[in-house]
Image (cartoon, grey):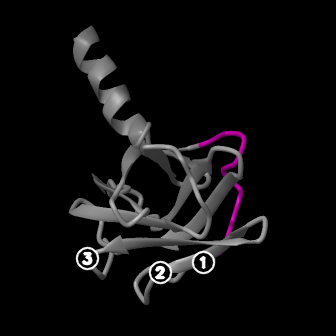
């Protein structure tokens, strides 16, 4: 019985409001279903994209970052989170390609509560972190 209770708590806790941010209501700043999203890091444009479209939860997706600057790192990490909700650790490893872009595959989980807003944060060594807020289809 004790094991069942622990398992139930772990499973239901995967989409629980964060006590410190549960009232945060951020709008999407990236219309990922339309095309790549752009952010600035210093004077350089960073493009972020997810395919296939529409971007849907629980399907394998390709994440691509096109930095507008020289980066020497062989890989970067996209940290995927849901503002105001804890969805566990979800990171996508982005490997450098021959073209100088970074690409990797991952899955965005579906929140049982129906929330669709996600945040991808990517730290670029020497240039800071860029974050993109986007909606995911169920």
Q: Secondary structure at mark 3?
A: loop
Q: What span is in magenta?
A: 18-28
Left or right, 7 with reference to 50: left
- Contact between marks 1 and 2 (CB within 8 A): the answer is yes
- The tally of labels here is 3
Quadrant of the frame with the C terminus: bottom left
Earlier in the chain: of badge 2 and badge 3, it is 2
- Tell me which residue sits at (43%, 62%) in the image: 100
Q: Which mark is residue 52?
A: 3
- Few, some or many C-alpha atoms within 10 Å of disc 1 (few <14, some 14-19, many ≥20)? some
- Given this view, does label 1 or label 3 mark the residue nearer the observer? 1
Going from N to C along the chain, the mark reached first, 1 or 3, is 1
Between residue 58 and residue 94, name the one nearer to us: 94
Residue 19 on the magenta span? yes
Q: Residues within 10 Å of mark 3 (few under 14, many from 20)?
A: few
Question: In the figure, 114 relative to 112: above or below?
Answer: below
Viewer-nearest residue: 109 or 120: 120
- Can residue 46 be seen here? The reply is yes
Viewer-side residue, 117 vs 97: 97
Measuring 42% from the left and 63% from the top, which residue is drawn there?
101
Q: Which residue is mark 1?
A: 38
Residue at x-position 58% and y-position 68%:
133
- Which quadrant of the structure image shows residue 25? bottom right
Does dot 2 land on a helix, a strand or a loop?
Answer: loop
Q: Is residue 123 above or below residue 99?
A: above
Q: Which residue in the structure is indicated by mark 2?
A: 36
Q: Main secondary structure of the magenta part?
A: loop
Mark 2: few/some/many CA within 10 Å (<14, 14-19, 20+): some
């Amino acid at each position: 019985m004790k094991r069942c209770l622990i398992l139930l708590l772990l499973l239901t806790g995967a989409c629980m409001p964060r006590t410190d941010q549960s009232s945060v209501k951020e709008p999407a700043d990236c219309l990922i279903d339309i095309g790549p999203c752009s952010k600035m890091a210093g004077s350089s444009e960073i493009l972020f994209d997810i395919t296939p479209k529409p971007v849907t939860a629980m399907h394998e997706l390709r994440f691509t970052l096109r930095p507008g600057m020289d980066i020497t790192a062989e890989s970067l990490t996209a940290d995927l989170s849901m503002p105001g909700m804890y969805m566990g650790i979800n990171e996508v490893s982005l490997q450098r390609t021959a073209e100088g872009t970074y690409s990797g595959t991952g899955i965005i989980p579906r929140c049982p509560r129906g929330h669709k807003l996600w945040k991808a944060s990517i730290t670029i060594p020497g240039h800071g972190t860029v974050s993109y807020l986007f909606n995911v289809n169920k």
